[in-house]
Image (cartoon, rainbow, N blue to C red):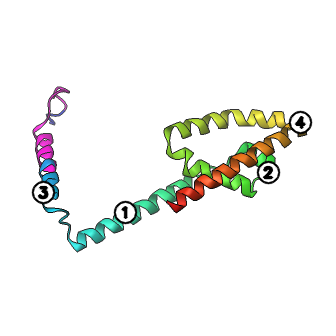
Amino acid sequence: MSTRRYARRDEVSPTELAEMGFCEKRVQLAHLYGDQATPEQRQAMARGQVAHQRYLEEGLVATADRRCFVATFVFGPDARETQVLRAYRDAVLLRRRWGRILVVAYYWVAPVGCRIMARSPVIVAGVRRMLCIVVARCERSLSDRRSS
């Protein structure tokens, strides 16, 4: 039986105490003597970082959502502008909590907006002009992210 189940929330288990002491000692030693990783350990860390980045990118591609209702309606599904907005959504918005909330709200509201736009070419023209400005800003933001 685990003693953790019966421990009060404000108590720290012996294992947790030992882990805290070990971590403090590692921090102290790293401060005093610097990074003491062997070349093999550095290679393993580098491989792990590359594998982690690849896993993250594959996950984003696998879960990428092709929905982009308004841009698809205004520009078409494979237009450059639509691709830029999707890339911005995936690279910026979906990586932040507020961005994910914004995307969910957009998916909830955008289909209604497209139905309204379908009734008025004047609205479509206005939305197209506005989206061109948004696309330009998104492109700038994405290129700044790539260069930094």
Q: CA distance from mark 3 to mark 1?
A: 24 Å
Label 4 neighbourhood size at 10 Å, few (<14), some (14-19), many (20+)?
few
Q: Is residue 27 left or right of residue 107?
A: left
Of the residues shown, which amino acid type is indicated by label 1?
A: Gln
Disc 2 on helix, strand or loop? helix
- Report the residue at 61% width, 50% height from top: 88
| Residue at screen point 40% across, 60% down | 52
Residue type at numbered disc 4 = Ser
Mark in front: 3 vs 1: 3
Secondary structure at numbered mark 4: loop
- Marked residue nearer the N-terminal end (1 or 4): 1
Picture coordinates of residue 144, whole percent (x, y): 56, 57
**Rendering coords of residue 100 (x, y %):** 55, 39
Amino acid at the residue labelled 2 = Phe
Residue annotated with mark 1: 49
Q: Identify the image quadrant of residue 38.
A: bottom left
> Is 52 placed left or right of 117 in the picture?
left
Q: CA distance from mark 3 to mark 2?
A: 58 Å
Q: Which residue is mark 4?
A: 120
On residue 29, which mark appears? Answer: 3
Identify the residue position indicated by label 2 in the image: 75
Q: Which residues are magenta?
A: 5-23
